[in-house]
Amino acid sequence: MAAAAVLSRSACTLVLCFLFSEQIMQTFAHGVGINYGQIANNLPNPSTVAKLLQSINVSRVKLYDADPNVLASFGSSGVDFIIAIGNENILNMTDSTKAEEWLKQNVQPYINQTQITCVTVGNEVLSGSDTALMQNLLPAMQSVYQALVALGLDKQVNISTAHSVAILENSYPPSSGSFRQDLAEYIHPLLNFHSEINSPFLINAYPFFAYKANPDKISLEYVLFESNPGVTDQNTNLTYDNMLYAQIDAVYAAIKAMGHTDVDVAISETGWPSKGDSDEPGASVENAATYNGNLLKRILMNEGTPMKPDVPINVYVFALFNEDMKPGPTSERNYGLFYPDGTPVYDIGLLREQFLMPSSSSNLMAWCRLGILISLMVILI
Ligand SMILES: *[C@@H]1O[C@H](CO)[C@@H](O)[C@H](O)[C@H]1NC(C)=O
Ligand SMILES: *[C@@H]1O[C@H](CO)[C@@H](O)[C@H](O)[C@H]1NC(C)=O
Ligand SMILES: *[C@@H]1O[C@H](CO)[C@@H](O)[C@H](O)[C@H]1NC(C)=O
Ligand SMILES: *[C@@H]1O[C@H](CO)[C@@H](O)[C@H](O)[C@H]1NC(C)=O
Ligand SMILES: *[C@@H]1O[C@H](CO)[C@@H](O)[C@H](O)[C@H]1NC(C)=O
């Protein structure tokens, strides 16, 4: 009897340990990503940035170009990168020779040391007004993909493009999400391509814009992931307690309406400005800290959206630094988690909490090992 009890207790300890370690691995595998924009004249050099990111344990970074200084400085850092081909280069990329040249120059020299997991071709092309660019988008993506295949890199590197939520015609309720009719001719073949090569559909989503446009109608708690009654989608009975998840699910619904259930959605940008002009309600240090802090908490919990509860949200926060040379309203220059000198714009206690996971996890593992050891000793005795 006693031996059986001890045995089952040690089995329990073992099972618990595996459960915990698996959970921890998932947190590691995913974590939060950060957009490293560089439209500024006062940013620290990339090797300093590498140290900053290491200090907050961020290991997924998205660039808006393929800056060789960044890619070289992050060699062997364990950080993985999404790099970008800018809109100005899309036409050239439809030429397979030029696409291969681009990869030879911007990916091949770095990829042995620096993980590059995705190349985005163009940013927010379909919500723009340049129809020639829209027409060239998919051919450019296909040609870069073919070049990846030719160089044997297609298993390591995904091809995608980032969209604004403005490509949606309907986003509410989420189950009625649909793409703009006039964009169907581009999005339909694009989804087929994503499905064929198994690459994610990327969305830049800013609940801040919705709030800024309609501060009287939209609840601040709802956009900031704070406690609120939420809104229920009458078609599905799913309740949404925040706008970002409603936007993500609207994109899933729009994709499904085009016949696909096999394309992942990831958030290539989301964030909240810590400062804005007088006509930008909601832009404040407090709200930015709340938005990004609550978002990080949810990422840490591996939470999925109501429609996809088992698929943890995949998010790149915008942005690492305040970027002083960005045009537009004051908010545009104030999305950063950090000032250019590396000091945090607001309390990133949450970042720390998340990034303390490794040490608390090793404590946990130590306890687990001790538990197993004691159980084994008891059994042997
Ligand atoms: C496109 O290719 C042409 C010819 O190779 C080159 O001169 C031009 O700089 C390229 N455009 C961009 C934006 O890289
Ligand atoms: C990267 O590694 C591959 C295979 O190990 C090797 O063939 C290639 O020359 C390396 N490239 C660079 C730029 O070091
Ligand atoms: C490419 O995207 C697919 C679909 O989201 C994902 O399963 C896969 O892990 C990605 N590959 C890399 C190298 O990140
Ligand atoms: C939603 O809930 C209502 C009331 O409980 C129920 O009548 C309806 O069938 C549900 N709809 C779905 C899609 O589950
Ligand atoms: C990052 O993780 C390391 C362990 O890998 C830990 O020692 C450190 O405290 C963490 N950093 C922060 C800022 O939480």
Image (spheres, rainbow, N blue to C red):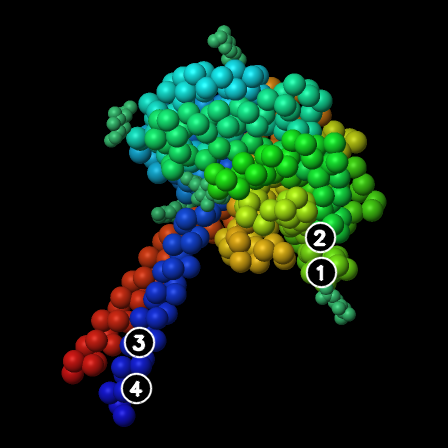
Q: CA distance from mark 1 to mark 2?
A: 7 Å
Residue picked out by circle 3:
11
Is ligand 4 less than 8 Å from the beta carbon at label 1? yes
Q: Quadrant of residue 133?
A: top right
Q: CA distance from mark 2 to mark 3?
A: 44 Å
The answer to whether the residues at label 1 and label 2 have Cβ atoms under 8 Å apart is yes
* Percent x, y of residue 283: 70, 37
Image quadrant containing the C terminus? bottom left
Image quadrant containing the N terminus? bottom left
Q: CA distance from mark 4 to mark 2?
A: 50 Å
* Percent x, y of residue 82: 47, 33
Q: Nearer the viewer, residue 69 or 137?
A: 137
Q: CA distance from mark 3 to mark 1?
A: 41 Å
Is ligand 5 less than 8 Å from the beta carbon at label 3? no
Q: Secondary structure at mark 4?
A: helix
- The amino acid type found where label 3 is placed reads Ala
Label 3: how many residues lie within 10 Å, few (<14), some (14-19) or many (20+)?
A: some
Compared across the picture, whether 90 is left or right of 379 comes to right
Residue picked out by circle 4:
5
**Residue for point 75% across, 36% down:** 181
Residue picked out by circle 1:
236
Residue picked out by circle 2:
175
The answer to whether the residues at label 3 and label 1 have Cβ atoms under 8 Å apart is no
